[in-house]
Image: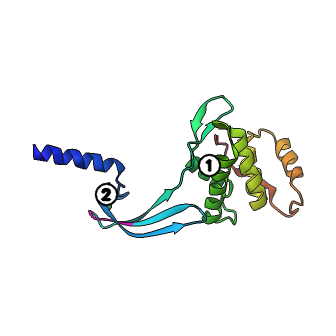
Amino acid sequence: MRFILYSGVRAWYRIGAMRCPYCNSTDSRVTDSRPDIEDAIIRRRRVCNQCGAKFTTVERVQMRDLLVRKNSGKVEQFDREKLRRSIKLACRNREVSDDQIEKLVTSIHRRLETETIDDAVSSGTVGQMVSDSLLNLDPIAFVRFVSVYRKFSRIADFKKIINQIPEIDDDSDTASVCALPKTSLF
Ligand SMILES: [Zn+2]
């Protein structure tokens, strides 16, 4: 009886516990906590008590549940990881660091949380925010991103958007702009 009660408590505890990414154990201890005020996150350095692996967890303040309404009308939970992946893909082989990408994702996420009042933001609003931010960061990444999110199907689409970019570098290799595979982003 005592054993059953004990395992019940353990099971309850495990729901909120952090799993070791190496051995799946929930038995770990925190060795260091560092708040990052600018990004509103806390990084916790952990050591797994089972296998000794070290890993970091990130706690992030979520201001409210954010929903995204796709063009099809379907509503989904805002997926921060998906956003990060799509930006990273657009920035592939460009001189944009992971840190810059993370900051960009954080700023877009926060703007969506604070500037939108509707229950769900449209995927177009998200796409527009990403486009605007990327244009400032890296024009090539911008063109790549826009080509995927607006589903460019003709070279003329690229010409049109490139002509809209102010003071584009004439020596830049526009061939690399078209090299991105088409994927569904939002
Ligand atoms: Zn482990």
Which mark is on residue 177?
none
Camera-nearest residue between 10 and 178: 10
Marks 2 and 1 sit apart, C-alpha to C-alpha, by: 29 Å
Q: Taking 42 as reference, is 5 left or right?
A: left
Residue 184 placement (x, y as % from top left): 64, 40
Magenta region: 46-50
Locate residue 29 relative to residue 43 in the image: left or right.
left
Q: Are marks 2 and 1 in contact (CB under 8 Å)?
A: no
What secondary structure is found at the residue carrying circle 2? loop
Number of numbered discs: 2
Q: Which amino acid lies under the numbered mark 2 shown in the image of this protein?
A: Cys
Tell me which numbered mark, 2 or 1, is placed earlier along the sequence: 2
Answer yes or no: is residue 14 visible: yes
Q: Residue furthest left?
A: 1
Query: At x 66% / y 48%, what residue is drawn?
Result: 114
Q: Nearer the viewer, residue 133 or 175?
A: 133
Residue receiving disc 2: 23
